[in-house]
Amino acid sequence: MKKIIVVALSLCSLNAFASPEGTLSVHILNQQTGLPSPGVKVVLDKQEGMSWKHIADGKTDAGGRIKSLYPADTDMTPGIYRVTFQTGDYFKSQKMETFFPGIPVTFNVSKNNEKLHIPLLLSQYGYSTYRGS
Protein backbone atom coordinates (compact mmCIF):
# COMPACT_ATOMS: atom_id res chain seq x y z
CA MET A 1 0.00 0.00 0.00
CA LYS A 2 2.82 2.43 0.87
CA LYS A 3 4.48 1.89 -2.52
CA ILE A 4 1.29 2.81 -4.38
CA ILE A 5 0.92 6.05 -2.42
CA VAL A 6 4.55 7.02 -3.04
CA VAL A 7 4.22 6.38 -6.79
CA ALA A 8 0.96 8.37 -6.95
CA LEU A 9 2.53 11.30 -5.09
CA SER A 10 5.57 11.20 -7.38
CA LEU A 11 3.40 11.34 -10.49
CA CYS A 12 1.38 14.24 -9.07
CA SER A 13 4.52 16.22 -8.30
CA LEU A 14 5.88 15.66 -11.82
CA ASN A 15 2.66 16.98 -13.35
CA ALA A 16 2.80 20.07 -11.13
CA PHE A 17 5.79 21.26 -13.18
CA ALA A 18 4.32 20.67 -16.63
CA SER A 19 2.71 23.40 -18.70
CA PRO A 20 -1.08 23.40 -18.54
CA GLU A 21 -2.96 22.32 -21.65
CA GLY A 22 -3.61 25.32 -23.87
CA THR A 23 -0.57 27.31 -22.65
CA LEU A 24 0.06 28.40 -26.24
CA SER A 25 -2.73 28.38 -28.82
CA VAL A 26 -2.96 29.72 -32.38
CA HIS A 27 -5.80 30.52 -34.76
CA ILE A 28 -5.75 31.34 -38.49
CA LEU A 29 -8.58 33.11 -40.28
CA ASN A 30 -8.49 33.66 -44.05
CA GLN A 31 -9.35 37.35 -44.50
CA GLN A 32 -10.37 36.86 -48.16
CA THR A 33 -13.00 34.21 -47.41
CA GLY A 34 -13.80 35.00 -43.79
CA LEU A 35 -13.29 31.30 -43.04
CA PRO A 36 -10.82 29.42 -40.84
CA SER A 37 -7.68 28.01 -42.47
CA PRO A 38 -7.51 24.26 -41.73
CA GLY A 39 -4.46 22.08 -42.32
CA VAL A 40 -1.81 24.78 -41.93
CA LYS A 41 1.41 23.51 -40.36
CA VAL A 42 2.64 25.67 -37.48
CA VAL A 43 6.16 25.26 -36.05
CA LEU A 44 7.24 26.44 -32.58
CA ASP A 45 10.89 27.22 -31.81
CA LYS A 46 12.71 28.79 -28.85
CA GLN A 47 15.76 31.02 -29.20
CA GLU A 48 18.91 29.62 -27.61
CA GLY A 49 21.81 32.01 -28.07
CA MET A 50 22.10 32.74 -31.78
CA SER A 51 20.13 29.68 -32.90
CA TRP A 52 16.61 28.27 -32.62
CA LYS A 53 15.59 25.01 -30.90
CA HIS A 54 12.57 23.16 -32.29
CA ILE A 55 9.93 22.70 -29.58
CA ALA A 56 6.80 21.44 -31.35
CA ASP A 57 4.67 21.58 -34.47
CA GLY A 58 1.10 20.82 -35.43
CA LYS A 59 -1.60 21.47 -38.02
CA THR A 60 -4.63 23.66 -37.60
CA ASP A 61 -7.94 21.84 -37.18
CA ALA A 62 -11.16 22.40 -39.16
CA GLY A 63 -11.72 25.59 -37.15
CA GLY A 64 -8.25 26.92 -38.05
CA ARG A 65 -6.99 26.35 -34.49
CA ILE A 66 -4.30 24.54 -32.59
CA LYS A 67 -5.63 24.63 -29.06
CA SER A 68 -2.42 23.51 -27.39
CA LEU A 69 0.81 23.90 -29.39
CA TYR A 70 3.23 23.88 -26.45
CA PRO A 71 3.98 20.33 -25.17
CA ALA A 72 1.99 19.64 -21.99
CA ASP A 73 4.78 17.55 -20.44
CA THR A 74 7.26 20.44 -20.00
CA ASP A 75 7.28 23.97 -18.62
CA MET A 76 7.07 26.88 -21.04
CA THR A 77 9.86 28.98 -19.53
CA PRO A 78 10.55 32.67 -20.13
CA GLY A 79 12.45 33.54 -23.29
CA ILE A 80 12.10 34.44 -26.95
CA TYR A 81 9.92 32.10 -29.03
CA ARG A 82 8.85 31.96 -32.66
CA VAL A 83 5.82 30.39 -34.30
CA THR A 84 6.09 29.97 -38.06
CA PHE A 85 2.83 29.62 -39.95
CA GLN A 86 3.73 27.60 -43.06
CA THR A 87 1.08 29.07 -45.32
CA GLY A 88 2.58 28.20 -48.72
CA ASP A 89 1.14 24.67 -48.81
CA TYR A 90 -2.24 25.95 -47.60
CA PHE A 91 -2.51 28.41 -50.47
CA LYS A 92 -1.25 25.80 -52.93
CA SER A 93 -4.04 23.46 -51.77
CA GLN A 94 -6.50 26.29 -52.45
CA LYS A 95 -4.97 26.70 -55.94
CA MET A 96 -3.86 30.22 -55.03
CA GLU A 97 -0.51 31.98 -55.15
CA THR A 98 0.88 33.77 -52.12
CA PHE A 99 3.65 36.23 -51.49
CA PHE A 100 4.23 34.82 -47.97
CA PRO A 101 4.94 31.06 -47.99
CA GLY A 102 5.92 31.26 -44.32
CA ILE A 103 4.99 33.78 -41.66
CA PRO A 104 7.28 33.87 -38.61
CA VAL A 105 5.96 35.57 -35.48
CA THR A 106 8.57 36.16 -32.78
CA PHE A 107 7.33 36.85 -29.24
CA ASN A 108 8.52 37.15 -25.67
CA VAL A 109 7.37 34.89 -22.82
CA SER A 110 7.91 36.68 -19.51
CA LYS A 111 6.43 34.18 -16.99
CA ASN A 112 6.49 30.41 -16.57
CA ASN A 113 3.55 28.77 -18.36
CA GLU A 114 2.09 32.14 -19.32
CA LYS A 115 -1.16 31.55 -21.25
CA LEU A 116 -0.73 32.99 -24.76
CA HIS A 117 -2.82 33.04 -27.92
CA ILE A 118 -1.49 34.12 -31.32
CA PRO A 119 -4.14 34.73 -33.98
CA LEU A 120 -3.22 35.26 -37.63
CA LEU A 121 -5.47 37.10 -40.07
CA LEU A 122 -4.28 35.91 -43.46
CA SER A 123 -4.61 36.81 -47.13
CA GLN A 124 -2.51 35.97 -50.20
CA TYR A 125 -0.52 39.20 -50.03
CA GLY A 126 -0.77 40.36 -46.45
CA TYR A 127 -1.33 39.35 -42.85
CA SER A 128 -1.77 40.73 -39.37
CA THR A 129 -1.30 39.27 -35.93
CA TYR A 130 -1.53 40.37 -32.31
CA ARG A 131 -1.41 39.01 -28.78
CA GLY A 132 -4.79 37.43 -28.25
CA SER A 133 -6.41 36.07 -25.12
Image (cartoon, grey):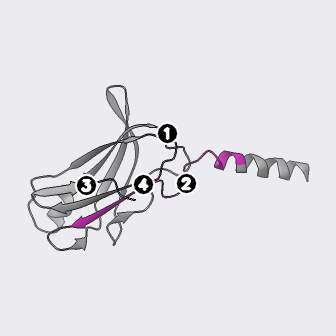
| Left or right of residue 122: residue 19 | right
Residue 129 circle label: 3
Q: Amino acid at mark 4?
A: Leu
Mark found first going from the N terminus, 3 or 1? 1
Residue 116 visible in this rendered orientation of the protein? yes
Would you identify the image quadrant in which residue 32 lies? Answer: bottom left
Quadrant into which the N terminus falls: bottom right
Secondary structure under tag 1 reads: loop
Closer to the eye: label 3 or 2: 3
Q: Amino acid at mark 3?
A: Thr
Q: Amino acid at mark 1?
A: Thr
Residue 69 circle label: 4
Magenta-drawn stretch contains 9: no
Q: Residue at x 20, y 73 (%)?
A: 34
Residue 87 visible in this rendered orientation of the protein? no
Label 2, on which residue? 20
Q: Is residue 22 above or below residue 43?
A: below
Label 1, on which residue? 77
Mark found first going from the N terminus, 2 or 1? 2
| Real-space Cα separation, disc 3 to disc 1, in angstroms | 22 Å
Magenta stretch: give its range: 13-30
Mark found first going from the N terminus, 3 or 2? 2
